[in-house]
Amino acid sequence: MTSAPIIGSKKVLSPRSFQGLFLAVTLLFAAAVGWLGWRLLEQDRALARRRRVEQLEAAADRVTGALYRRLSEFEEILTGGGRLPDGAVLLRTRAGEIETQPPDGLLYVPVAPVSRDAPPGLFAASEELEFRRNDPAAAIAALQPLARSGDPAVRAAALARLGRNLGKSGRYTEALAAYGQLAGLDAAAVYGLPAELVALESRCALLERLGNQPELAREAAVLHRNLMNGKWSLRRATHEFQLAQAREWLGEAAESHYDRGKAALSAAAETVWVTWQRERGGKGRRIVAGDPAVLAEWTSDGEELTALLAPAATLEAALGEAGAFPAALADAEGRSLLGRAEPAARLRVERTPASTKLPWTLEVASLDDGTGQLAGRQWAFAAGFALLMAMLAGVSFTVARAVSKEMAVARLQTDFVAAVSHEFRSPLSSISQIAELLDAERWPTPEHRRKGCEILTRETARLRRLVEGLLDFARMEAGTESYRLELLDPGEIVRAAVEEFRPAANGAAVEVQVAGGLPVIRADREALRRALWNLLENAVRYSPAPARVRVDVATAGGQLAIRVRDDGIGIPADEQAQVFRKFFRGGEARARGVKGTGIGLTMVRHIVHGHGGEIKLESTPGQGTTFTILIPAGRTA
């Protein structure tokens, strides 16, 4: 005999395999959506960065154009065709003379002007009398005619010497008067210094020697103010020496204000002078670093120098053409000269001297790379992606839970069918064996026949209880079970149920304790008996031999309490909430091979709830379990 060929086969996925496949597809879809979204955002970022770079390029072009226009105005000023900006100084050198416009634009000049002192030979006689003969009185007589000279240079030199000798002679008032006359000769020079400066310094020195502090403070304040205003053309060393001396005389009363702008212009003039002395001829342009920085532009034919010195801030308007982007000028070494450099800039555009033909590097920066405007889109995408993931997670969870529940139900149903089959098989086997013996009339003695009939009766009753239990459970699940309620004595019901159970207790000791004064209850005698039977059967089944079960009947809080206690294996805490579910059987029961269908406690809960009561469970693994039925006294369901 040959087997039939296999026409076709179809492999069905198991629930766990279906879960895995569904999860893999979900993750693949989520990964694809995430990758596409990331690519889209990256393209947007690249485009935003490119747009920002283009904006920086345009800003740099605008700034470069503005710088050219501003510098062309300075070139016109150098040729005498323009107006000096505020705070600027025009410096010219001709035949060794230095001329500044305005005259007081600098605190000091890079080279001392040509002095117009009187011929020193005119004062040889007076100096002989003053220094060699130590005869200031004779020197005064020799100087008085010269002090009345019509030549300002001679007169200034004579007054300076006259005041000194008058002071040595103790004629202080006359000395101060001589210095006062000297101060009025503005255009004259003494010892290569302006006559007024020599007069003020000499008066301050004499007043200090006399201890005349009020007059000293007044004269020193005039000296200090003139030095700070750049009234005289002095070399830097001379200016700083005189300024320090004036401040020493003034003490705490010295003015704290210092014209930093004029000081920066003066330092820049020295720098331009040194550069011109080294290079000569041609044109030049630079920003001299300082506080503040100074823009210097000059032209020279080799013999004469014309330089324009202006605060570098005059170029800030050109840098302002960059708009909202910070712009700065830097030298060849990268040092910032003007503007606001941004070390933390995300993007920057540079214009080097080679491209602009300017002596500086122009930098226009941006604190952000242009992607900040994409924040809204990024958040929207992130929110959408999160929502999609949440939906996928919810769907996946729902499907996984449904499949798991179906698997659990299928497993419970399989276990239930197996348990019921086993429960039916045992009495049916006994009934079948006894029926065979009866049919063959092979009983050794009448006593054996009587015992066989007892077993047949007991197993038939057991089989009937199983069938009735299944039918009652089906009616309870369908909601068609009804109860015939009547007034009953709870003590009598419990005692009768225990006595009926004793033959099936397999030798277990069942103790009953009924309290006195119990109220009557409205209950279905058969249903309540069935509930007690199930609790007693469980107590014996899950207790080690010899089992001991205690049944207590009492009142608790106005209700009737029926407690069934055992000393069995107990129920773990994580399983206690599930023991009333249909088909559920504990892990310890399955491990020990304890028989059962998993519907007994479910039926007990149905019956108790049908009587308007509740059932409670207390259990400790290894120490036993207590089930408590609470039924309202004298109340209908």
Image (spheres, rainbow, N blue to C red):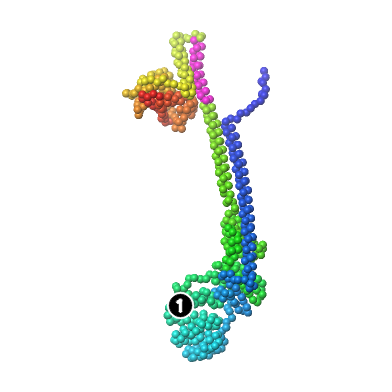
Relative image position of residue 625 (x, y in whole percent)? 41, 28
Q: Which residue is mark 1?
A: 218
Position of residue 256 in the picture relative to residue 53 (left or right) = left
Magenta segment: does it hold 634?
no
The quadrant holding residue 321 is bottom right
Q: Residue at x 42, y 21 (%)?
A: 483
Depicted 130 relative to depicted 54: above or below: below
Q: Which residues are magenta?
A: 413-438
Taken as a whole, is the magenta stretch helix, strand or loop?
helix
Q: Identify the secondary structure beneath mark 1.
A: helix
Q: Residue at x 48, y 26 (%)?
A: 582
Depicted 559 relative to depicted 313: above or below: above
Q: Residue at x 44, y 86 (%)?
A: 170
Relative image position of residue 523 (x, y in whole percent)? 39, 22
- Between 332 and 637, which is closer to the camera in this rendering? 637
| Residue 585 in view (yes/no) | no
Magenta segment: does it hold 415?
yes
Position of residue 184 in the picture relative to residue 608 (left or right) = right
Indicate the quadrant containing the N terminus: top left, top right, bottom left or bottom right.
Answer: top right
- Between 126 and 163, which is closer to the camera in this rendering? 163
Q: Residue at x 59, y 37 (%)?
A: 26
| Residue 116 in view (yes/no) | yes
- Between 65 and 208, which is closer to the camera in this rendering? 65
The quadrant holding residue 3 is top right
Relative image position of residue 69 (x, y in whole percent)? 63, 65
Mark 1 Cα shell of 10 Å, populated few (<14), some (14-19), many (≥20): few
Indicate the quadrant containing the C terminus: top left, top right, bottom left or bottom right.
Answer: top left
- Between 198 and 491, which is closer to the camera in this rendering? 198
Q: Amino acid at mark 1?
A: Arg
